[in-house]
Amino acid sequence: MRSLLTLAAASVVACTSSTPPDPVAPLTIAAPAAIDPCATEKATASASDTSADLETLAVCYDTNGRLIDALKSSQRALVRGIETREREAMAASRVHVKELVERMPHITFAADDVEGLAVVFDGRPVPADRLTKKFSVDVGEHVVSASGRRNGKTVKHEERIAVAERDFVTIQLKLE
């Protein structure tokens, strides 16, 4: 019987490979959707709901820089392993969850005092009462925009930030 870690490691190769695209597809689809490199693993994990398949999906997400999705999947694998009393699965998932939590980048926001401050991070609004809280984010580039009013005038801020593993970034919202 192959170990869970062997299966998870094998998925690294599987989730990063892809078949060549259909040469006719670009002619028939105006704007092709982004291809999810973990689609196969996701479908398998959804169908089986086993700890091994959930952890394989977590490894695929991890390999593709989607640490938040990897953490969610690995946590589900851990719960499933506990429910089914699979010691090997529980051990592997515990290690992966711990590692992902340690590697997870975080952000928070700091802003001047402005009226009606509205912040949007990667297209999602951030509630004003949560701006100073610590948010987990995926590795990579993100877009933040903010707007408000100062002295009766609208002030705005927009920037792209790059976040690496283990980073803790305070985004200074310089509304001008």
Image: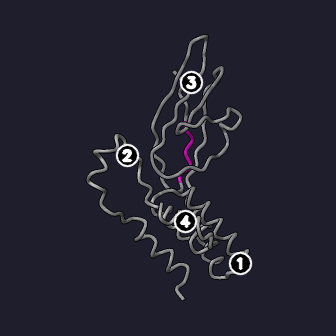
Looking at this view, is 41 or 64 the one in front? 41
Q: Position of residue 54 (x, y in %)?
A: 58, 68
Q: Position of residue 143 (x, y in %)?
A: 48, 38
Q: Which mark is residue 67?
A: none
Label 1: which residue?
A: 84
Evaluate if marks 4 and 2 touch, with contact meaning CB atoms under 8 Å apart.
no
Evaluate if marks 4 and 1 touch, with contact meaning CB atoms under 8 Å apart.
no
Work out whether mark 4 precedes mark 1 in sequence or the reverse, and give the earlier one.
4
Provide the residue span drawn in magenta: 167-171
Marks 4 and 1 sit apart, C-alpha to C-alpha, by 19 Å
Q: Nearer the viewer, mark 1 or mark 3?
A: 1
Q: Alpha-carbon neighbours of circle 2 within 10 Å: few (<14), some, or many (≥20)? A: few
Q: Which mark is residue 147?
A: 3
Q: Which mark is residue 32?
A: 2
Q: Secondary structure at mark 2?
A: loop
Q: What amino acid is at disc 4?
A: Ala
| Residue at screen point 67% across, 75% down | 81
Work out whether mark 4 precedes mark 2 in sequence or the reverse, and give the earlier one.
2
Looking at this view, is 45 or 146 the one in front? 45
Evaluate if marks 3 and 2 touch, with contact meaning CB atoms under 8 Å apart.
no
Q: What amino acid is at disc 3?
A: Ser
Residue 10 visible from this viewpoint: yes
Q: Nearer the viewer, mark 3 or mark 2?
A: 2
Q: Nearer the viewer, mark 1 or mark 2?
A: 2
Marks 1 and 2 sit apart, C-alpha to C-alpha, by 40 Å
Q: Alpha-carbon neighbours of circle 1 within 10 Å: few (<14), some, or many (≥20)? A: few
Q: Secondary structure at mark 4?
A: helix
Q: What amino acid is at disc 2?
A: Pro
